[in-house]
Amino acid sequence: MNTILVINAGSSSIKFQLFAAGGERSLKRLLKGRIEGIGVKPLLVTEGVEPGMTTEVRYSAAEVPNVPEAMRRVGGWLREAVHGFPMAVGHRVVHGGPEFHQPVIVDAATLAKLERFVSLAPLHQPNNLEPIRALMAQAPSLLQVACFDTAFHRGHPDVADRYAIPGKFYAEGVRRYGFHGLSYEYIASRLREIDPRVASGRVIVAHLGSGASMCAMVDGRSVDSTMGFTALDGLPMGTRPGHIDPGVILYLVDRGMSTADLQRMLYHDCGLKGLSGISNDMRELLVSDRTEAALAIDYFVYRAALAAGSLAAAMSGLDAFVFTAGIGENAPEIRARIAARLGWMGAKLDAKANDRGGPLISAGDSRIPLYVVPTDEELMIAQHTASVLMRSGRSL
Ligand code: ADP
């Protein structure tokens, strides 16, 4: 059986899924797993080897101190659980820089190019590239495909791609890249199945997870995103602030804060966690009766509604709004509160449909249809990997 392995390596976790490949549109998920808490409290969880079966393996921090070691453990587990090597591995790579508009087969030269973008995404890119490098060393003939979070946004018009700073910085790569592109691309393809007429219109997709952003799409193509040069901008997130006056950063630098401390704070201590002082997890905030939790939720909803207004203006109107990712898919209260703030645009929720989770959650007389569409970045990566294989003349 031909299989495609998908690897999504983050800063402290590696998620993986294995698909049986019969063609680009004929992929069957065989199993999935993740190793989380790398270097702290590593735990490997897998499901799907037998129907309904899950397994857990705990390691000490010394046994799995970093991403390469975690990758070796995942490889070892896969070799025992699955017979035969995958025909290709598809990787999520956060940054394709200004150059990569679509997925590519990674060879040594491509890897060297992708390493140049480490400075653009210092916390994510090294972890994305590490498993590629490790597999290249272990199995040089194995085909590896990089799928980029930025690629879906590379067609943005100039006004959405620029910052109003001297042009020489743009030339060296200081641009509004946008992220979560694999999620948005998947949602665009699902919308075409759910309602082709809506999919061809002006749509905002709200990817509300630990990381959160929104994308303005016209006819299934991204025209703007709330994220920019890095995944810090735009909406408030679990631990990242979203939109912030750069003057605040200058003030903190002036006060003596180091770049490393600032980076730690901006990626790990802000957002829902910073505002509430309680948790970065929306579930905990929703059940808390503390005023700080209420403020963090109010802020999240307020900024989401502001961003929606701004993206609707980017498209001179709005034909549909889609919720996705952890919060978007699972928190009816947050969806209801954001939808209420979009009432001025004609959005009207159907409370019962919202509680059921959609896909359509708007009332019959809502001017704008509202949807919940679960995202599937791993399937998107597997599809890209299959189509790259087919384009390069390999049969599945
Ligand atoms: P990521 O893939 O970026 O880690 P997810 O898309 O899985 O993030 O989203 C994770 C977030 O989704 C969690 O931090 C949590 O706040 C939120 N979430 C998950 N389930 C629920 C739920 N039932 N109610 C509210 N929030 C939820």
Image (cartoon, rainbow, N blue to C red):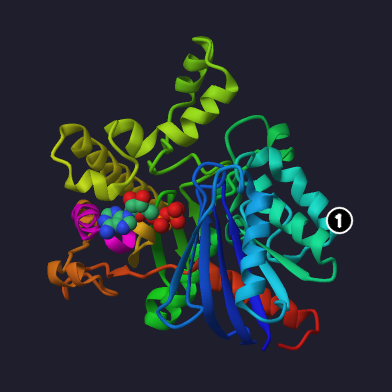
Does residue 195 show up? no
**Would residue 60 be found to the left or right of residue 119 on screen?**
left
Does residue 107 show up? yes
In the rendered structure, which segment of residues is drawn in magenta? 328-340
Mark 1: few/some/many CA within 10 Å (<14, 14-19, 20+): few
**Which image quadrant: the N terminus?**
bottom right
Q: Residue at point 73% right, 58% down?
A: 132
Residue 184 percent across, percent down from the top left: 49, 64
Q: Residue at point 67% right, 81% down?
A: 83
Residue 195 percent across, percent down from the top left: 37, 81
* Vertical position of residue 221 compared to residue 68: above or below: below
**Would residue 173 be found to the left or right of residue 353 on screen?**
right
Ligand 1 quarter of the rendering: bottom left
**Would residue 391 be found to the left or right of residue 21 on screen?**
right
**Which image quadrant: the C terminus?**
bottom right
Residue closest to the eye, 298 or 106: 106
Q: Residue at point 38% right, 41% down?
A: 236
Q: Predominant secondary structure in magenta?
A: helix
Residue 73 percent across, percent down from the top left: 64, 59
Q: Give residue 89's quadrant in the image.
A: bottom right
Q: Is residue 24 magenta?
A: no
Residue 46 percent across, percent down from the top left: 49, 68
Residue closest to the eye, 148 or 48: 48
- The secondary element bearing badge 1 is classed as helix
Q: Which residue is mark 1?
A: 109
Of the residues shown, which amino acid type is indicated by label 1?
A: Ala
